[in-house]
Amino acid sequence: MVDFDRRAFMIGAAGVLAGVAAGVAVPSPASAGVPPASGTHHIFAVDDYGASPGGASDSAPAIRAAIAAAASWTGGGASRTASVVFSSAVYRIDRASTASWYALEIDGVARLALYGSSTTLLVVTPYAGALSIARSTSMRVEGFTIDYATVPFTQGTITAIDTVAGTVDLQLLSGYPTLADAALFPASNYGTLRNATTGLMKRGGQITFSFTHTGTVLPSGRWRLTIAPDHRPQMGAMAIGDGFVTGFRGNWNGVAIYRCTDVTVASVTMYAAPGAAFIASDSDGTVIRDSVVTRKPGSDRWISANADGVHNHGGRVGPRIFGNTFESLHDDGINIYSTSRAATSVTGATIGLAGGAIPLAPGDVVQIVNTATGTVRGETTVVTVTGDSLAGGPVSATLAAMPSGTAAGDQLFNRSFSAPGADVQYNVFRELRGLGVRLRTSGAYVHANEMFDLAYWGIWVANDPQYNEGPVGSVDSVIERNSIVRPCLDRSVLGWPSAAAGIMIENLRDDYEGGASKPHHGHVVKDNYIEDPPRFGIFVGGAENITVSGNTIASTAGNPRTGAPTAMFGTRNSHAVALSALTVHEYAAIPRAVVWGGAGVTGFTHT
């Protein structure tokens, strides 16, 4: 998960379009797939606007000029389209001359494509994003490699450990930024333990540690980290010689998409990003396909993007994410969700709502939840909205019917703006600090993804109360033919129920215990393969009418066990859960139970 801030996306159109006349540039050799020039399609070559292939100087102003010319052309008629093409070269891009935190920015544009051909965009400022697309439609970005001249993270080896004082001394590797850079490394942060030879996450104990630092180097040239008090009991997982990496976590990302419709990112390779690799916020029908986020080959880097691979917040049409590879992320693979607004008042059928990132419109289906107990008050429809919900400030809404018991302090989720129908297929996830897929939307299809060596669990169909990510309970999603191998490498996250399983469906209350309601229903979990799961292979909680069929769960001799409850399949607080055709391969000397049923389970069938 990655925090986002609307400021990161609010880019003024004037910086892109002002002062640049429309025109047709003489095209450079276009990459494969660029439509030919015609009366309605013009090609704009960035080199003809002064871009410097080879990376000798900052090409961002010239690229922005080419984009502005193309945008002016497409703005001249609804049938007009444009391609901005790049040479097979390296272009240095810097944010220094822009008002935003992105080197390249597009705002309020339609029917425009950026085409690279073995093109590298080398971002100069480590805490800047590469590309932001805001309030635009029918856009395409294809054929680029995105990298950073100075990576937005640092890494080094542990040279001293003081468990009494709770400190660790770190010798940074040459060529990486230092903790003295306050813009990159705030006083409080988190990092992960690594095998210093391979750069892979260290196995066997806690992997992620929160810490503080002073930004002052020791006389020895090393840096002292003070481990957070709640993580100090796990410092036994650390050893002198271990690697440790920590990254910048601001509100800027590799490619950002804000309030857009029909944006496609295809065949993009990303070696680093200060936040998520790709982030879509309040956007409809985003497509991320055939892209790769990974450590730069031939480098000694230990991570790729500092946060998620794809972070999708809200939208009325879910994203399509297929054929991608996500490796060595410093957070989750994919997170699809919406956030909530807190109720401030309840009067008849009118509810007052605090500010928030979720917009509301008449006809939207909303869910009202007491998150302290995990009780869903009910679902209803918005009739009218008073105030501008797009602005993010407080509003009030009149509902078709106020769910019984609704009170100030409850949380309202907009189901209609929770990326319904998300499609996640044929992706590969490997060596992630977080989990594979966080899924809170409804009507999703998660199919044939492969996951290996995740610090946390595999597929998590559950709300996240700490961040108000939900809704609380989703419906009618299909999770099939996925392979999840070695989830929960971080053995400190094996608590139950919040991190119980390779595939998990659950309603969580504020303290991450199981909630009272059964808001999940209609999900199908079938034909998945799970190897070496934590407490459970598959877990179903807070749910009704769930089908679990044809899955295979294997547990090797080296699969560590945790405290009870533990089983291949588990369920609690659920009704009408049908488990069938479960195949179990158990190689441990003491086999775990095949099925565990907790309290409140009714209508459970096992064949």
Image (tube, helix red, strand yellow):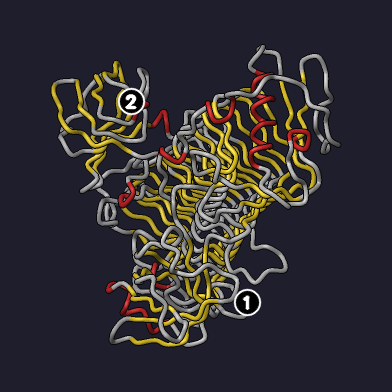
Which residue is at the front of the view, 505 or 274? 274
Of marks 1 and 2, which one's residue comes earlier in the chain?
Answer: 1
- Work out whether residue 133 can be spotted: yes
Who's the residue at 47% across and 86% down the image? Answer: 159
Q: Quadrant of residue 141?
A: top right
Which residue is at the front of the view, 497 or 325? 325
Q: Which residue lies under the disc numbered 2?
A: 389
Q: Which residue lies under the disc numbered 1?
A: 198
Whether residues under marks 1 and 2 lie with C-beta atoms below 8 angstroms apart, the answer is no
Q: Quadrant of residue 175?
A: bottom right
Q: Say what amino acid the circle numbered 1 marks.
A: Thr
Residue 417: x %, y % from top left: 42, 30
Q: Is residue 297 left or right of residue 586?
A: right
* Local crowd size for mark 2, using a 10 Å CA cut-off: few (<14), some (14–19), many (≥20): many
Who's the residue at 37% across and 23% down the image? Answer: 364
* Local crowd size for mark 1, using a 10 Å CA cut-off: few (<14), some (14–19), many (≥20): few
Who's the residue at 27% across and 43% down the image? Answer: 517
- Work out whether residue 581 can be spotted: no
Residue 569: x %, y % from top left: 44, 60
Q: Say what amino acid the circle numbered 2 marks.
A: Ser
Who's the residue at 28% across and 72% down the image? Answer: 230
